């Protein structure tokens, strides 16, 4: 009897939370089904703390319950739905624990997708730290690798595209910052080249090609710039940068072309040996006329 009262006292302490107060009698129930249904109702009402108390009761008090896997997923969902950085971190922990314990469960693909979602919800704008975006991209790609027939594949692919666009934009902004603010074309070139190598599907690739060509020309590497500018003109004929790329190519070619000089007249010392001069014979005068014979 004392143990039961102690348990009820502990459960009552759990119940004081902003997400709602769990029913003490329900938490003390010997029926995992009753506790599960109460947790589901609390979650539907956005009483997140109360819902978590019910789900944890099943996990800790009924280790062999058929509701065990669902309770672990629902625990992660309660944190995810409540939102906020701290809750997303706790949600990731809950989903990962589910994947560790039930790697072959029919809903393991959902848990994997939700891990990606937790990171995706924490992503920053392209001008800030991109660690959450990188993490989200990795988790979505893991879903594609491990669960190729999952119903979440298309959603994951959409998220992957969004992540890649954000990461490509972050690289471009960093490169443009080096180019314009720091006047460091060398650092900018590295960033622009990284976009071409890692994010060829970036939506504003025409701008990247133009800025890369511009930096290469400013660095005295005009021959390396020409292929990028030509690609811009060929692949993005409607780009606003096409005319500027043509002008830059023309200017680069003019600078790179060697100056044409008129040949200097050869000096006597450096002129090729002429053929020996043949003396012109002096014409012999005709003989003087003789007087006629008498």
Image: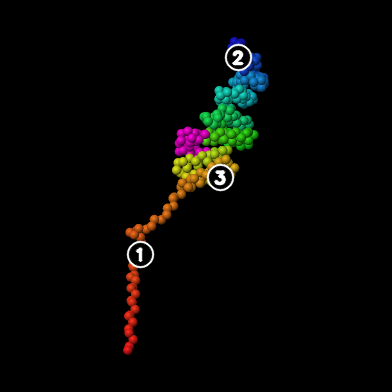
31 in magenta: no
Q: Position of residue 235 (x, y in %)?
A: 57, 44
Q: Nearer the viewer, residue 79 or 240?
A: 240
Kindly state the secondary structure of the residue where label 2 is placed. Answer: loop
Marks 3 and 1: which is nearer the front? 1
Residue where numbered disc 3 is placed: 233
Region in magenta: 173-195
Which picture quadrant has residue 239? top right
Residue at image x 42%, y 53%? 261
Query: Are the two marked residues, 2 and 1, in contact with CB atoms closer than 8 angstroms?
Result: no
Colour pattern of the rendering: rainbow
**In which quadrant is the C terminus drawn?**
bottom left
Q: Which mark is residue 16?
A: 2
Left or right, residue 204 beside residue 292: right
Marks 2 and 1: which is nearer the front? 1
Q: CA distance from mark 3 to mark 1?
A: 56 Å
Q: Is residue 57 visible?
A: no
Q: Residues within 10 Å of mark 2 (few under 14, many from 20)?
A: few
192 in magenta: yes
Residue where numbered disc 1 is placed: 274
Residue at image x 49%, y 33%? 177
Residue at image x 33%, y 73%? 282
Which picture quadrant has residue 28? top right
Q: Position of residue 233 (x, y in %)?
A: 56, 45
Q: Residues within 10 Å of mark 1 (few under 14, many from 20)?
A: few
Which picture quadrant has residue 95? top right
Kindly state the secondary structure of the residue where label 1 is placed. Answer: loop
Q: Earlier in the sequence, mark 2 or mark 1?
A: 2
Q: Position of residue 211 (x, y in %)?
A: 51, 39
Q: Position of residue 102 (x, y in %)?
A: 59, 29
């Amino acid at each position: 009897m004392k143990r039961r009262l102690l348990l009820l006292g502990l459960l009552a302490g759990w119940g004081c939370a902003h997400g709602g107060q769990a029913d003490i009698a329900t938490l003390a129930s010997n029926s995992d089904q009753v506790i599960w249904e109460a947790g589901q109702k609390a979650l539907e009402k956005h009483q997140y703390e109360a819902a978590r108390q019910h789900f944890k009761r099943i996990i800790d008090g009924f280790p062999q319950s058929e509701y065990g896997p669902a309770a672990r997923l629902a625990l992660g969902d309660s944190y995810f739905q409540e939102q906020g950085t701290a809750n997303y971190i706790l949600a990731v922990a809950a989903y990962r624990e589910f994947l560790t314990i039930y790697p072959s469960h029919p809903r393991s693909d959902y848990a994997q997708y939700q891990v990606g979602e937790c990171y995706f919800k924490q992503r920053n704008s392209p001008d800030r730290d991109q660690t959450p975006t990188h993490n989200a991209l990795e988790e979505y790609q893991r879903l594609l690798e491990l669960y190729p027939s999952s119903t979440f594949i298309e959603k994951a692919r959409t998220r992957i595209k969004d992540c890649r666009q954000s990461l490509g934009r972050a690289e471009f902004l960093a490169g443009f910052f080096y180019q314009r603010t720091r006047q460091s074309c060398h650092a900018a070139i590295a960033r622009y080249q990284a976009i071409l190598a890692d994010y060829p599907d970036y939506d504003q690739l025409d701008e990247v090609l133009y800025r890369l060509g511009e930096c290469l020309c400013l660095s005295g590497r005009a021959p390396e710039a020409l292929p990028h500018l030509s690609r811009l003109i060929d692949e993005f004929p409607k780009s606003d940068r096409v005319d500027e790329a043509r002008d830059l190519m023309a200017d680069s070619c003019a600078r790179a072309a060697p100056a044409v000089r008129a040949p200097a007249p050869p000096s006597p010392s450096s002129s090729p040996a002429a053929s020996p001069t043949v003396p012109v014979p002096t014409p012999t005068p005709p003989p003087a006329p003789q007087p006629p014979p008498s």
